[in-house]
Amino acid sequence: MNSGPPPSDDAEPQGGHRPAATAERSKLWFDETVVVPDAFRDLLVNYSRVPPSEVDEHVIQIRNKAWEVHHYPCLGQFRFLELNLSSRPRGDLYARLLSTLGSASEPAFLDVGACLGQDVRKLIHDGAPPSSVAGAELSPTFVRLGYELFRDSPAEVAMLQADILAPLGEEGPAAAPLGRFRGRLRVVQLGMILHLFTWEEQLAAFENAIALLRDEPGVLIIGQATGNLDGVVTQTLTVGGANKGTCKHNVESFQRLIGDVEARTRTQWDIKADLDEGLSVNDGKRTWDDPKTRRLLFELERVR
């Protein structure tokens, strides 16, 4: 298996979960109105106890507060309402996850890049013990507004401000926030973050995810990211104003990445990955983006 990132292109920086953008450009992905999906409406009404008549306005108010800080497409187009984990196409992953968490007596699932923590709350609403799940977000704004959106608290739901790329460090008071999970988890979800990283950063994210998991066959790394039919490196504008080459995978380039992960960690994984038309590709709302953009879905199960 060949190592290294997919070939670079010189395309205009494209959208994603975290790129910086000019005010003019960000207007391309800002929706003034919202249609709240039934599953998310149920979550707000029956988990968060938001009165049904107030759901739409509540969602818009939280989105607008987040937009004041981050001009991201996932906010502007309300894509955080999609509950991607529970609605993954094909297979029974979500049902298996609920079964695993139902018998867990300690943290077993971590959602990295949790946005407003919607998948974590959905798991709890569907029966997962709150102590078995946690979320991690680089943005403290997302952590704070997640509690406001779902009307719960840190005492009820563990949402951490943390960076998956940070060294986990030693155990004890000096440990990184995610260090508390080292060797304890059964499932790590990498949610809409990989396409923001270089090849080396993606390797680091997977290495840290593996370190957080139990050292045994059967543990899972699942997730999704912005992908591309060609598997390319695009120049993404960072919040600091610099450009960096971030990898947007097709299935073949993603498999090469995991091959490098296996070599570094001396582990072996069964890889399930495919591209589909999620992320609003299928409804024509990504008008600013490369027409070859697709959603990459993946599920990795450790076999050795």
Image (cartoon, grey):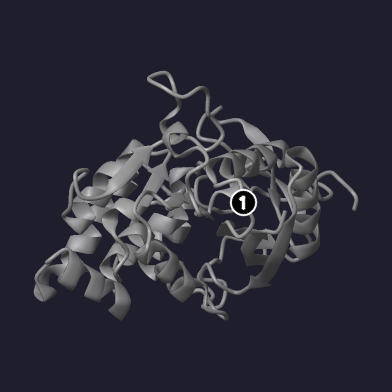
Residue found 43% across the figure and 57% down from its top: 74
- Residue 270 sits in quarter: bottom right
Instruction: Give the side of residue 193 with respect to residue 103, left or right.
Output: right
Instruction: Give the side of residue 159 with respect to residue 90, left or right.
Output: left
Number of numbered discs visible in the structure rendering = 1
- Residue 252 sits in quarter: bottom right
- Residue 198 sits in quarter: top right
Q: Secondary structure at mark 1?
A: loop
Q: Amino acid at mark 1?
A: Glu
Residue found 56% across the figure and 78% down from its top: 282
Instruction: Give the side of residue 61 with respect to residue 142, left or right.
Output: left
Which x, y percent locates residue 111? 44, 52
Closer to us: 71 or 299: 299
Residue 116 in view, yes or no? no
The residue singled out by tag 1 in the image is 216
**Residue 261 position (above or below residue 41):** above
Q: Residue furthest right?
A: 2
**Residue 285 position (above or below residue 91):** above
Residue 128 in view, yes or no? yes
**Residue 114 position (above or below residue 285):** above
Which x, y percent locates residue 236? 63, 42
Which x, y percent locates residue 39? 31, 77
Residue found 48% across the figure and 44% down from its top: 184
Closer to us: 26 or 248: 248
Q: Residue furthest top?
A: 174
* Disc 1 residue crowd, few under 14, some 14–19, many 20+, Cα 10 Å: few
Which x, y percent locates residue 22? 48, 43
